[in-house]
Image (tube, rainbow, N blue to C red):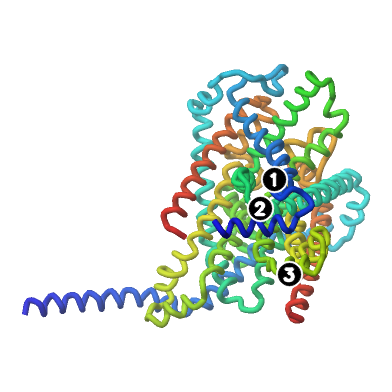
Amino acid sequence: MSEVATVRDEGERHLRLIHPKAAGPLLVSPMAFWMLAFFLVPLILIILYSFGTQGVYQTGVSLGFETKWYEQILTDPSTRKAFVLTMQMVLINTLGCLVIGYPLAYFISVKSGKRKTLFVLLIMLPFWTSFLVRTYAWISILNNTEGGLVNNWLMSIGLIDEPMEILYTNFAVYLVLIYDYLPFMVLPLFVGIEKIHKSLYEASKDLGAGKWTTLRRVTIPLSMPGIFAGSMLTAIPTTGEFVVPQIIGGGKVVLWGWLIYQAFTAGRNWPLGAALSNVLLLFMLIVVALYLRAIGNKDF
Amino acid sequence: MADGTVMDTAVAEQRRARVRLSLWDRLMGHSDIGLGAWSALVYIFLYMPVVVLIVFSFNSQKLNVTWEGFTLDWYVKLFNDTAIINAFVTSMEIAIISTVAAVVIGVLGSFSLERFEYRTKMLWDGLNYTKIIIAEIVAGVSSLLFFVQLNEFLLEYVGFNFWSVFKPGFWTVAIAHIAWNIPFAVVIIRARLRGFDRQIEEAGSDLGANPVTVFFRITLPVIFPGILAASLLCFTLSFDDFVTTFFVIGQNYNTLPVQIWGMVRMGITPEINALSAIMIAVSSVIVIFLEIKAQISKDIA
């Protein structure tokens, strides 16, 4: 109570030009307007219009109360298949990023010494060029001809005689997805591991624990907030991903994001697209609810 | 006797448990080398495509597949390709507008959220966090619906054609990018405000400075690193954004990512590699510069 009061007093002191009570809301108003008008209202609109009908000339939407788009999503076997494949992709990408990223985050936080900032910057640097171009560059690496870098290398060391099929496979899609999402996992993991006090490692060692025991019983449990945050930042955007499966997978597999893309472009069925993206919204709410429960339970 | 047996079993079990543990622990004994090697591999993984596209930007073969010979042709062609240059300029304009707007709005918002107590605070906080974690495609298509419906509404009830006043595409993208950037700016700037020693501000006002002077001479310089970091992030997010942009840009404009997406089917020409190589070079220089500057100021402190 008194803390709140002091904060308020200091705030008032700071902006005596306007009425103290008005200062907070006044300062927040541009942000509030922007987020309401260009984020919350569109979100409400898309929920409303998913119950609507297709507009004239099939573009746009008209309000209504139809549940047929949701029925279509639930009954259509191809949509169901897309859902299963998308969830599989989300799972593999998130776990892949976690398994590959955790040792790296640990290395940067605990072992990199004075160069810590540099190592963190090095993770972000490649991401300053268009991710479309970086994704496209993988085609040259994974190409199915002798010219593909991986094939070329494998043939030159004599492991294979003929070029292998790498590009346009599920493996290639997962590899490039992990590539694109890794920083979203590593940075929260790094922050999570960084928050662990270094003396805890020493305490664990002094009490006779080996490295494995320390990792399993100290480092991993204490970095759980980072693991959860990173997993969320990776999993949620992956649900709508369509660029990598399209470029690297050759569009062979239809995923949820691609269904939405199609509904709003060539398919010209906006209400269906709205319903499809609401399913993602629902998924996100579930993940966030689980996340909040995990945080609440573990008392981080 | 019986006690002894129980004890013995317990001791034996404990010893076995210790042996089992230490097996894993022993395996991890030299993990530092493994850890370093693993990290090095991950860095190679992260930089491989970047190296490939830089190398291919000097490759005389057009197909981006095999190395043929050194050329600077793609750099020359790049500067003569009006479609790419226009897309680049549009991307820059939108990124600058959305960064400046989002950071200004973000500074005010962070200040309010961090320093004042009022009832709606939770709502604005919640909206920001939701925006950060939501799948971008949802935000993209909902913005598209919003702009189309807004235009219909204005035409019907106000008799005002939104698209004729706001260049279709350009401003819709800028508006969507500002909304996309604000929460990120707020998160970064708030973190900086939180670690702020309020006594310097008090000292300022005790010495007779008015609130505006205190803000511009004390608060702003102290939170400046946060503002800089937020600006860099916002600029990158906006400049590289594809999903939201794709849905709200319409027919008349192209940003660089949208242009590249259009080219992907035909095969990206090495001109794009050349442009990416230039962009990497510029951003590396900026990062190295900032790093050196930070190092110097750390040394002085």
Location of mark 2 (residue): B116
SS at badge 2: loop
Are the residues at dot 2 and dot 3 in contact (C-beta closer than 8 Å)? no
Residue visible at 83% across and 48% down?
A: B97
Give the image quarter of residue A156.
bottom right
| Residues tagged 2 and 1 counted as in contact (Cβ below 8 A) | yes
Q: CA distance from mark 1 to mark 3?
A: 25 Å
Amino acid type assigned to the residue bearing label 1 in the image? Pro
Mark 3: which amino acid? Ile
Label 3's element? helix
B298 lies above or below A166: below
* Residue located beneath label 3 in the image: B200
- C-alpha span from label 2 to label 1: 8 Å
Q: Specify which label sits upstream in the sequence, 2 or 3.
A: 2
Asked if both marks, 2 and 3, belong to the same chain, the answer given is yes
Sort mark 1 into few (<14), some (14-19) or many (20+) by Cα contacts within 10 Å: some
Expressed as whole percent of the image width and height from the top left, the position of residue B138 reads 63, 38
Report how far apart the C-alphas of labels 2 and 3 lie in the structure.
18 Å
Disc 1: host chain: A
Q: Tell me the residue that label 1 is attached to.
A: A25
Quarter of the picture containing the N terminus of chain A is: bottom right
Give me the disc on residue A72: none
Assign a secondary structure to mark 1.
helix
Label 3: few (<14), some (14–19) or many (≥20) C-alpha neighbours in 10 Å: some
